[in-house]
Image (cartoon, grey):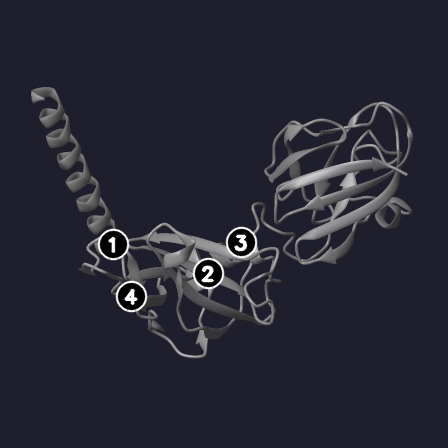
Amino acid sequence: MKKIIQSLIYLSIAIVFFVSCEKDEAKDTFVSGTTPVFAASVKDSIGLNFNTEDDKAVTFSWSNPNYQFASGISSHNVAYTLEIDTAGANFNGKNKISVSISQDLTVTYTQKAFNILISDLKVKTGKVAQLEMRVLASLGSKATSIVSNKLVFKVLPYAPPPKVPVPTAGTLWVTGNAFASDWSNPLPSPFDVSQKFTKVSDTQYELVVDMKSTGNYKLIQEQGVWGTQYKKLAGDASSGTFEKKDADPGFDAPAVAGKYKLVFDFQAGTYTVTKQ
């Protein structure tokens, strides 16, 4: 009888414990939250300029969603996500940017930092882009996720300065013993034409030319001048990096003679040589 009474006591304690737990769970049931009010320190457009890239571009801020549970206002740390996408993509674009802000209610970007951030959207530099932004608040589960209002801004992304200084006059030639011209500088006719690059853009030059299978070469931007030449920094006959410097080494000739396309990208500081 004593054992039966003892068992009943333990069972009663267990029942009270489970009932208590259920009540505690009921207390922690998620009720609601307030939509965050998303705001910015600028209106309509966010100014970006390389000459002032260290200046502040924008400060974003938003209100606390004040999450409510059955027991009252939550004291949990809220996680925020800043979302940026191109206008019209409805925040479903393949290049959408999502930035975790942790528990803060504000974030500030310099012009440089914001220009780098939106580059992931693959927006074109030098062309006005329209972007949409919003903030998502959450306590770690989809059920507690709340989306703020949307803001729209125009921005004009800029390209960072080229890694290699571009030719001053916009002209570029190749010379060296990897070509029929040998190391002539200035280049005599017809090499002054056949070994002159085409300026494809402000930072890219291309040339299709016959090359030997031995020797080296360099790039000159002024006929008769070696002091402003470009030479290899690292790489091989097919690709690598280059710099503006009056020094060795030169670029290597390909292993097989023939017609090749030379592409020099001053923005990235890279070159490629492709057989045609």
Q: How crowded is mark 4: few (under 14 residues within 10 Å), some or many (20 or more)?
A: many
Q: Are marks 1 and 3 in contact (CB under 8 Å)?
A: no
Up-down relation of residue 80 to residue 217 (above or below)? below
Q: Residue furthest bottom?
A: 44
Q: Residues within 10 Å of mark 1 (few under 14, many from 20)?
A: few
Discs 2/1, front: 1
Secondary structure of the residue carrying tag 4 is loop
Which of the pair 68/258 is nearer the observer? 68
Left or right: 197 in relation to 97: right
Spatial CA distance of label 1 from label 3 is: 59 Å
**Residue that carries the numbered disc 2 in the rendered image:** 83
Q: Is mark 2 on a helix, strand or loop?
A: strand
**Residue 34, disc:** none
* Position of 40 relative to 191 (above/below): below
Residue 52 in view, yes or no: no
Mark sitting on residue 26: 1
Rendered image quadrant of residue 229: top right
Q: Position of residue 44 (x, y in %)?
A: 45, 79
Nearer mark to the viewer, of 1 and 4: 1
Instruction: Please report the residue visible at 24 percent of the width from the left and 47 percent of the height from the top.
Output: 22
Vertical arrangement, residue 199 with respect to residue 224, above or below: below
Q: Judge depth for marks 3 and 2 and give the one in front.
A: 2
Frontmost of labels 1 and 3 is: 1
- Amino acid of disc 3: Pro
Q: What residue type is labelled 1?
A: Ala
Query: What residue sits right under mark 4 in the picture?
Result: 65
Picture coordinates of residue 77 (x, y %)?
25, 52
* Disc ID at residue 161: 3
Q: Which amino acid does label 4 sit on?
A: Pro
The numbered mark, 1 or 3, whose residue comes first in the sequence reads 1
